[in-house]
Amino acid sequence: MAAAPDAERLAAVQAVEDEFSSLIGSFRRVMAEHAERVSPGMLPGVYKVFTTIARQEGVTLSALAEALMADKGQMSRAVRELEGLGLVERTPDPADRRSSLLSVTAEGRERLAAARAPRERALVRALEDWELDDVRSLARLLGALSRGTAPEADPIVG
């Protein structure tokens, strides 16, 4: 049986959670800004659907709902909105004619690029004064956290 975390470890983990909460808040603000740039009044959730379609080009509605852990009806409404804006289109799925593949239109790609442009290099700028080894360590630690594994030791830099 694993020992209960000591007070110092618990405080450190709570500090990580607090920083993630702050980071998530910042991320939500950025998503809202991007959504507004793509189409005034677009909700951040619809923007997330849009960017997921862009990342997973040729995705079915079912796969989209699964990827976003959302209801198919909710996804369907968001896709209809994106289609109405000329940002997304459906094409028949060659593997299953009963299904459609969703993809971003040329107009959608242009608007997505324009929406992202003002913040495109924000992370690069935020990390530009960091030592390269610290950036690599951050990526390694975040990867371990997302996998739910202990971080691997930093490779020896020679």
Image: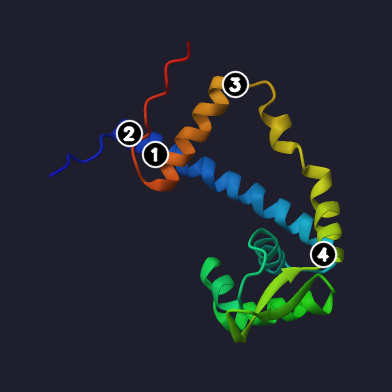
Residue 113, horizontal then vertical, whole percent: 82, 53
Residue position marked by numbered label 3 in the rendering:
132
Q: Earlier in the sequence, mark 4 or mark 2?
A: 2
**Label 4 secondary element:** helix
Q: Residue placed at 37% from the left, 36% from the top?
A: 11
**Residues packed near mark 1 inside 10 Å, few (<14), some (14 to 19) or many (20 plus):** few
Residue position marked by numbered label 2 in the rendering:
9
> What amino acid is at disc 4?
Gly
Q: CB of mark 1 within 8 Å of CB of mark 3?
A: no
Residue 26, horizontal then vertical, whole percent: 66, 47
Seen in the image, is 17 located left or right of residue 50? left
**Residues packed near mark 3 inside 10 Å, few (<14), some (14 to 19) or many (20 plus):** few
Quarter of the image for residue 94 reads bottom right
**Label 1 secondary element:** helix
How far apart are the alpha carbons under marks 1 and 3? 25 Å
How far apart are the alpha carbons under marks 3 and 2? 27 Å
Q: Is residue 16 visible?
A: yes
* Foreground disc of the pair 3, 2: 3
Q: Is residue 53 above or below residue 117?
A: below
Q: Residue furthest top?
A: 158
Residue 13, label in figure: 1
Seen in the image, is 57 located left or right of residue 35? left
Residue 94, label in figure: none
